[in-house]
Amino acid sequence: MNSSFFNKKHQFYLALFIALSVVLLALIGPLLAPHDPLETDFLSLLSPPNEEYLLGTDQVGRCILSRLLHGAAVSLGITFGMLAIIFVLGIAIGSLAGMRGGSTDTFLMRLSDTLLAFPDMVFAIAVVGLLGPGLINMMLALGIIWWTKFARLSRVLIKTEMQSEAVIAGRMAGASNFKLFRLYLLPAVMPALLTQLSLDIGNMMLAMAGLSFLGLGIQPPTPEWGNMLSEGRAYLQSAPWLVIYPGIAIFIVVMIFNILGDSTRKYLNPERI
């Protein structure tokens, strides 16, 4: 039993270390870039990997490596920023529904049910299509649909914890709802919520890259992995490195954060496995 637990613990810390290394690389990536990601070299259009441009250049002579390094900060920064906002909003709405109950609970859950009836990407594409492409509209579209996951999970967990002896004793002692939430409910439900958060990092990155690939997210010339794929697809046969390298970057980073999410689930919730 203990051996199994420590194995899961070590797996979690290893996955966390690798994920943090990726985040660190994204932060210092712009400093490591050999060229300006927006600088064009018309003498090296669609140049294959060489000594000057290690990963080649794109259709207007921009360094692929430099754009990948700058794009890492853009992609991860927006992903973490979006999830932080959605995480707090979802917990607030779900906790309100779980603690208040009654008509408040019914209204908020029916609203989330309505949004969950639509597939995530279809809903996001429809919203961005109506509002117009761009970073703000992409964040708004994903935020409208994504908060429901954390709201429903936190609501279920809060309603369960409301029946615990600690909360019942706190109510009998005259503790306010806010104090009960801060001291008892939030610490009790946070492991499961953090597990869901870690699992959603890769999903959010894929959703953002997908919208940018369709031309609905971050717009060129901003270096972002999704729109790099979108720009490179027209040159797939003549210059495949335009698609291969950003595709590999997305695959590796999403895989790392999915492994982190799975190891977090096993470590923080060992009794549910």
Image: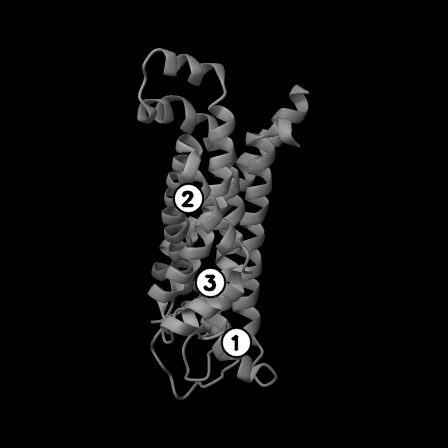
> In what element is the residue under mark 2?
helix
Q: Earlier in the sequence, mark 1 or mark 3?
A: 3
**Foreground pick, 144 / 189:** 144
Amino acid under disc 1: Leu
Residue that mark 1 sits on: 242
The numbered mark, 2 or 3, whose residue comes first in the sequence reads: 2
Label tally: 3
* Discs 1, 3 touching: Cβ within 8 Å: no
Q: Marks 2/3: CA distance?
A: 19 Å
Colour scheme of the picture: one colour
Q: Is residue 120 above or below residue 92?
A: below
Q: On residue 208, which mark appears?
A: 3
Task: Give the answer, above or below, for where 26 lies relative to 269.
Answer: below
Please state, as top left, top right, bottom left or bottom right, where the C terminus lies in the image: top right
Residue 227 coordinates in the image, percent (x, y): 45, 72
Residue 32 lies, with reference to residue 12, above or below; the image says below
**Is 111 left, or right, of 176 in this rendering?**
right
Q: Real-space Cα distance between discs 2 and 1?
A: 37 Å
Give how far apart the Cα atoms at labels 1 and 3 are. 19 Å
- Check disc 3: other Cα within 10 Å, few if <14, some if 14-19, many if 20+: many
User: Looking at the image, which residue is at 54% across and 60% down?
Assistant: 118
* Front residue of this view, candidates 112 and 21: 112
Residue 87 in the image, given as x and y percentages of width and height: 41, 44
Q: Is residue 273 above or below residue 172?
A: below
Q: Classify residue 101 as left or right of residue 202.
A: left
Give residue 100's quadrant in the image. Answer: top left
Which element is circle 1 on?
Answer: helix
Mark identifier at residue 90: 2
- Position of the N terminus, as image quadrant, is top right
What type is the residue that disc 2 sits on?
Gly
Instruction: Give me the disc on residue 21.
Output: none
